[in-house]
Amino acid sequence: MGASPSSSRVSAGRSNDPPILILTSLAEGDKHGYALLKDIERFAGVRLGPGALYGAISRLEERGLIEAVEASGRRRPYRLSAAGAEALRSALADLRVIVDEGSARLSRRAGPTPAAGAAR
Amino acid sequence: MRGSRTIEWLLRCYPPAWRARYGEELEALIVDMTGGRVPWRMRLDVIRSGASERLRAAGFDPGDPPAERARAGAVLVMWAWALFILGGAIVAKSTEHWQSAMPSGAGRAAASAAFTVLFWAAAFTGLVVLAGIVAALPSMARMLRDGGWRAIRARIIVAVSLTVALVSATIAMAAWAHGLAPRLRNGHDAAYGAAFLAWAVLSAATLLAWTSAAGRTAFRLRLPGPVLRLQALLACVAEGGMAVVAAATIAWWALVAESSPGALVGGPTSGRAPVIVPSLTLALALMLGATALGALGARRAAGAVAALD
């Protein structure tokens, strides 16, 4: 028994996890590191450090979720692979379950709370 | 340019293979973000990421499958044992004459008991580590048959070369020591002392080179489940053995220091001798550090084996 193949799933984790942010950014089109950072800051308000960004990029590339695009300069763009798009869909569906459940619970909680306060 | 040197230094935090693939891109990104003057917060981000990549390269990725984690844990215990041996060798050298320098009595009997525990626990732990290596031999033979020699060749050559040098140096030192009076052999001949120190450094380098070769080999083996479980079990037992040896060393030191501190340096048994001996302090620090490292490895291996089922 040796090492098993790496998982191609991205854990839903938190919505500000670097892998999800990178996959989301690349869903719009190919980007290099600096463009990724700027885009992520714009749509998520998260400022990733260069170390955190490239740590996530290397793992995503290793798992086949993103691919490097040929580039002549030192700024290499990345693109979302088919497996990456599927992994992002799956992670977003997981997050949506939490969003829906959380919203439903909050709306249920919103009703009785003022009444309970008035009864006291 | 100062900024370039900083970035170059930061990139050295990453393992060479990672640097070869992403180093240029990361450097370009840092320059784009900072213009070359890297703020401390960013430096910490890169250092943390580089350390994480080095841990991954050494087989310590938390996302690794259980088989890989068990293997990495066992290899870490093997590294801990190598460091522990270095500490143990310093203890052995420092305590060569303690029994003859200590008067007989209750203190000596108790210290002798602690020393006996230390010795046999060390011997037992050595056998446990050896058993782990023997258990991996069939998998190693398979790896070599499948053409795995190329991956480990460089480290094995370094280890064998150091071993040849060590054997030659040992023969030369033994011949030299044979012609010296005991007093000169024990610190009163500067040239012999310097040569002995060089021999000790060569011994340590040889041990670490073999450990490095064994570690690299271990990461290339395809170990069956039962062997992985055995390796994890042996890693836990070896860690226990190191803890016992370290505890026995502390007990021995305390007992000798209490009744006859001069015996710690093999000197006179009366008068005010220091109880904190630099060589023993270094040895104990190495042993305790190795035991802590081994505990991390054993914990990782044991946790991974539970997930293997």
Image (spheres, grey):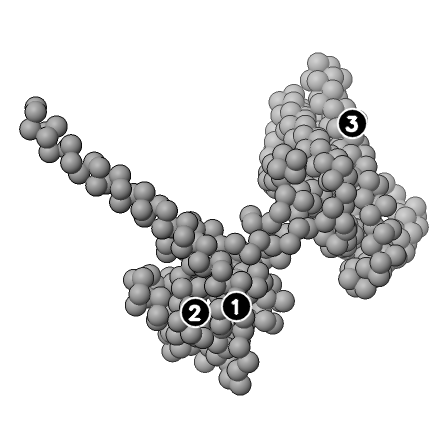
Residue A92 in sight from this viewpoint: yes
Tell me: B42 left or right of B127.
left
Within 10 Å of disc 1 (Cα), the crowding (few <14, some 14-19, many 20+) is: some
Marks 3 and 1: same chain?
A: no
> Chain ID for label 3?
B
Query: Most extreme residue toward the top, as rendered?
Result: B106
Q: Earlier in the sequence, mark 2 or mark 1?
A: 2
- Give the letter of the chain under mark 1: A
Residue assigned mark 2: A26
Residue linked to disc 3: B120
Quarter assignment of residue B276: top right
Residue drawn at 26 percent across, 39 percent down: A105
Q: Amino acid at mark 1?
A: Ser
Relative to B242, say whether B139 is above or below. Answer: below
- Please state which of residues B157 and A34 is positioned toward the viewer in this rendering: A34
A30, B3: nearer the viewer: A30
Of all residues, the one furthest to the bottom in this rendering is A72
Which residue lies at the image location 62% right of the left edge and 22% below the top edge?
B258
